[in-house]
């Protein structure tokens, strides 16, 4: 079977859960098509230039299968995603530092409640420590709304050891769809091209027919051991990060649990 057919089937399987999310949020197939066209044009322009030169519209049309008129329309309109990867970096950074750095931990190594009005190692000081000029009250309200922090008796308490927004608003969690799935696909694409000489680590573990008790044990193991491992890596690597880093480049790793039916259907040839 030729690689284009294999890729088409793989893309279809990626799109099935994505289509479910899109339909639930009112994103139509026509909307999706516009996004796809923009992604193809942006990628061709950014990554497929010759000898470092920008890709012109004629070459973009050739690579994407779109007309030069459509390419020009997309380029001139500046179509693209509203929120860039990393827009939520600030809130995530607050939680990461609170969980992983000594000034914000108690004697047992757990994130301690932080005062809101004192001048010592309190929540306003934590916000200053990460180099933010956003008022700490604004950040605290947002973390409360996401059910990550609770405010009680003049102190802020971390409810979760990771930046995982809760509540009924799916909009708080939708950015993860773009960040996490894009990161995994980028790694798989890297391994397709460079897997023979410079592969990135990418594994998964599948248990066919796992019963309810087994699923519970797997979830508990991930929540216990996975979270502990992430916190250990965060502690070890934080000294190697820069708070003043600018740009959209990210380096990291991910752990996730899945329980799904394998999508059927899709391209036949």
Image: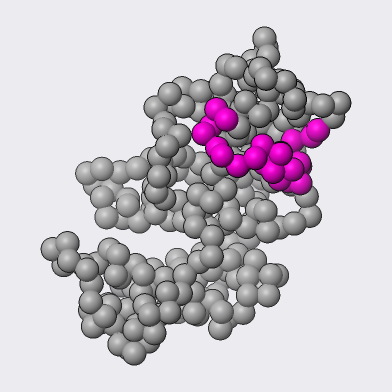
Spot occupied by residue 170 in the image (x, y as percentages of width and height): 71, 58
Task: Report which quarter residue 203 is drawn in.
Answer: top left
- At 86% from the left and 26% from the top, the residue drawn is 153
Task: Report which quarter residue 245 is drawn in.
Answer: top left
Which stretch did the figure color magenta? 128-151
**Left or right: 255 as drawn, with respect to 147:** left
Height in image: 48 above or below 142? below
How many discs appear? 0
**Left or right: 32 as drawn, with respect to 203:** right
Taking the image as drawn, is residue 20 in sight? no
Q: Quadrant of the C terminus?
A: bottom left
Q: Quadrant of the N terminus?
A: bottom left
Height in image: 209 above or below 66? above
Height in image: 74 above or below 245? below
- At 46% from the left and 78% from the top, the residue drawn is 267
- Residue 213 belongs to magenta span: no
Residue at the far left: name it.
51
Task: Report which quarter residue 243 is drawn in.
Answer: top left
Height in image: 141 above or below 37? above
Q: How is the image coloured?
A: one colour
Query: In terms of depth relative to the viewer, which is nearer, 103 or 160?
Result: 103
Residue at the far top: name it.
107
- Residue 143 belongs to magenta span: yes
**Left or right: 219 as drawn, with respect to 184:** right
- At 51% from the left and 28% from the top, the residue drawn is 234
Spot occupied by residue 207 in the image (x, y as percentages of width and height): 59, 45
Taking the image as drawn, is residue 185 in sight? yes
Spot occupied by residue 187 in the image (x, y as percentages of width and height): 39, 50
Query: In terms of depth relative to the viewer, which is nearer, 215 or 75?
Result: 75
């Amino acid at each position: 079977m030729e690689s284009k057919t294999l890729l088409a089937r793989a893309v279809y399987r990626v799109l099935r859960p994505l289509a479910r999310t899109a339909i639930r949020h009112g994103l139509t197939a026509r909307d999706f098509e516009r996004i796809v066209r923009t992604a193809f044009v942006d990628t061709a322009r950014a990554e497929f230039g010759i000898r470092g030169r920008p890709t012109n519209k004629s070459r973009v049309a050739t690579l994407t299968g779109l007309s030069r008129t459509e390419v020009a329309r997309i380029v001139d309109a500046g179509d693209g995603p509203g929120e860039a990867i990393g827009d939520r970096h600030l809130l995530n950074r607050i939680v990461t530092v609170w969980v992983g750095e000594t000034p914000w931990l108690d004697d047992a190594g757990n994130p301690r409640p932080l005062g809101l009005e004192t001048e010592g190692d309190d929540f306003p000081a934590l916000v200053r420590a990460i180099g933010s000029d956003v008022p700490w009250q604004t950040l605290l309200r947002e973390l409360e709304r996401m059910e990550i922090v609770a405010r009680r008796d003049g102190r802020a308490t971390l409810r979760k050891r990771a930046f995982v927004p809760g509540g009924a608003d799916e909009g708080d969690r939708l950015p993860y769809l773009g960040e996490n799935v894009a990161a995994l696909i980028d790694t798989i694409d890297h391994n397709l091209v460079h897997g023979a000489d410079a592969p990135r680590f990418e594994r998964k573990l599948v248990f066919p027919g796992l019963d309810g008790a087994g699923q519970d044990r797997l979830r508990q193991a991930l929540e216990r051991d996975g979270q502990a491992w992430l916190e250990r890596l965060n502690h070890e690597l934080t000294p190697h990060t820069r708070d003043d880093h600018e740009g959209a480049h990210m380096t990291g790793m991910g752990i996730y649990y899945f329980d799904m039916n394998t999508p059927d259907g899709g391209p036949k040839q």
